[in-house]
Amino acid sequence: MTQMKSFNVEIVSSGKSTLPPSGQVKLSLLDVSLQDAPAISLAELRLRCGGLLPINLQLTFDSSLIAPDHVYALAVRIEKDGQLHFVNTSRHPIEPATISGTQQVTVDSVVAPQSTLAPRRG
């Protein structure tokens, strides 16, 4: 039986940062129990926003999917036009079955590597 539960998440930056205009924020609750397999997303929230961090969100998930012997974490990605701008670089473990209060997830700016290719001359 579906048992919906919610908790608050505050996304903050490790430095003074603004989100790109119309950036896409993706907040996920992940089951990270399996060492050699991709994480399984149990809940996801996507929205477009821009401006200053922090961002306060509420994530809702089905608590009937939570297994007591599994390990869970929050993940945040902020992109614009498919290019990653911010991501949490540290694991943010949580216990969804007993979660309370606001979870604060820190994201770091991702600097796109500069091209090492010489410009083409025509």
Image (cartoon, grey):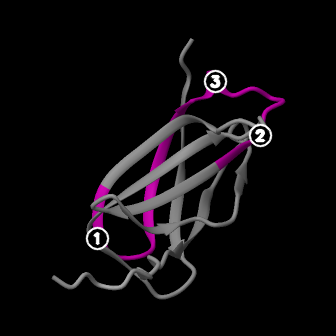
Q: 76 or 102: nearer the eye?
A: 76
Instruction: Point out the residue furthest to the top here.
Output: 1
Disc 1 residue type?
Gly
**113 falls in the magenta region:** no
- Of mark 2 and mark 3, the one earlier in the sequence is 3
* Callout 2: SS: loop
Q: CA distance from mark 2 to mark 3?
A: 12 Å
Mark 1 crowdedness (10 Å alpha carbons): few <14, some 14-19, many ≥20: some
Residue occupying the point 79% across, 33% down: 70
Mark 3 crowdedness (10 Å alpha carbons): few <14, some 14-19, many ≥20: some
Residue 77, x across and y down, in percent: 47, 59
**69 falls in the magenta region:** yes
Q: Up-down: is 43 above or below 58? A: above
Q: CA distance from mark 1 to mark 3?
A: 32 Å
Residue occupying the point 75% across, 26% down: 67
Dividing the picture into quarters, in which one does residue 89 lie? bottom right
Q: Which residues are magenta?
A: 48-73
Quadrant location, the C terminus? bottom left
Q: CA distance from mark 2 to mark 1?
A: 32 Å
Q: Which residue is mark 1?
A: 50
In front: label 2 or label 3: 2
Residue 57, x across and y down, in percent: 44, 55
Q: Which mark is residue 65?
A: 3
